[in-house]
Image (cartoon, rainbow, N blue to C red):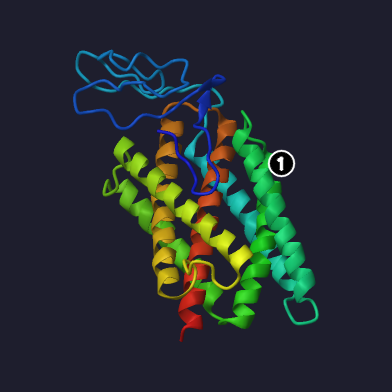
């Protein structure tokens, strides 16, 4: 099962320089079928005994063999450590930019200019990492630092001109979504399979296209564009954006779980951290936008 982010697509984890596209959970008593396009190890889809080399099944009894264990394989501790480092970089630079780039009348244009520039460069770095064959820690941390600058200025502006408590509420909301999805995923309430993946990707594509059209109307037509980011429609689309972010968190958890179980290289923990950071930033921005609309309409 390949996990993707609402903004930037990512490849699946790899092992021994091969591509590992993680499949949906196998049917009870049946073998896993490797049909991921581009996977050099995938067997033909019509073969009832085709096996994923990273999740081999006992064909006779349908019981999974022990996960692949190799020296230098990724562990959950690796993922947690890399994710903490990446998110910590985002938070640190966000706090510094909040303090050093004020959004008062005298410095507003300068701070906004720096924030927009940092956001655009962060987007380029994220795209570059998305197309690289291997994760680059330096590239990922540079993205995190620049994204933090953008988030810090935007958050400061919202706190200054809309409501003081909005930023804290957005942070708490993001943490609550993360914890809720993690609990639901571990408890089996969310089943990540191909149908779930297809539905989420289709919904995300439609959402992003609508937001892009709305942005074009805003830039060239002025005002609020088509109104997808303000008023009642803005509230609806804000909730949809948060739900999509939660769905992508579930896909990320599945990818990490499969990577650990099937022996992805340790360096791929950086890729997991990168993906989780992208998704959490998405959820935070949707919360911030939603709460801004709610507070501005009071």
Is 23 situated above or below 257? above
Q: Quadrant of residue 31?
A: top left
Q: Where's residue 134, x and y in %? A: 62, 30
Q: Where's residue 290, x and y in %? A: 47, 70
Is residue 221 something one can see in this rendering? yes
Residue plotted at (56% across, 31% down): 266
Q: Quadrant of the N terminus?
A: top left
Is 89 situated above or below 64? below
Is residue 145 something one can see in this rendering? no
Secondary element under disc 1, as helix, strand or loop, is helix
Between residue 232 and residue 145, name the one nearer to us.
232
Residue to which mark 1 is pinned:
138
Give the class, few, some or many, for how many residues have Cα within 10 Å of label 1's Cα (few <14, many ≥20): few
Is 211 situated above or below 157? above
Q: Where's residue 30, x and y in %? A: 22, 22
Residue extending furthest toward the bottom: 298
């Amino acid at each position: 099962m390949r996990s993707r982010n609402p903004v930037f697509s990512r490849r699946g984890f790899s092992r021994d320089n091969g591509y590992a596209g993680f499949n949906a959970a196998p049917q009870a008593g049946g073998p896993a079928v490797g049909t991921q396009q581009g996977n050099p190890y995938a067997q033909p889809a019509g073969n009832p005994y085709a096996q994923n080399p990273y999740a081999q099944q006992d064909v006779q009894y349908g019981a999974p063999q022990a996960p692949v264990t190799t020296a230098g394989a990724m562990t959950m501790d690796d993922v947690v450590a890399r994710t903490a480092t990446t998110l910590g970089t985002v938070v640190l630079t966000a706090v510094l930019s909040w303090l050093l780039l004020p959004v008062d009348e005298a410095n507003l244009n300068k701070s906004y200019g720096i924030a927009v520039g940092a956001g655009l460069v962060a987007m380029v770095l994220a795209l570059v990492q998305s197309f690289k064959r291997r994760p680059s820690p330096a590239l990922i941390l540079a993205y995190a630092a620049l994204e933090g600058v953008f988030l810090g200025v935007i958050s400061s502006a919202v706190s200054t001109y809309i409501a003081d408590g909005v930023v804290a509420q957005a942070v708490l909301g993001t943490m609550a979504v993360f914890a809720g999805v993690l609990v639901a995923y571990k408890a089996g309430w969310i089943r990540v399979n191909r149908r779930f993946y297809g539905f989420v990707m289709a919904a995300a594509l439609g959402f992003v296209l609508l937001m892009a059209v709305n942005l074009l109307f805003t830039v060239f037509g002025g005002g609020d564009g088509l109104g997808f980011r303000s008023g009642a429609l803005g509230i609806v689309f804000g909730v949809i954006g948060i739900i999509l972010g939660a769905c992508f968190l579930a896909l990320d958890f599945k990818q990490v779980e499969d990577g650990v179980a099937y022996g992805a290289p340790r360096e791929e923990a950086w890729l997991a951290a990168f993906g989780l950071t992208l998704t959490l930033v998405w959820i935070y921005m949707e919360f911030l936008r939603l709460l801004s609309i709610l507070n501005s309409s009071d």
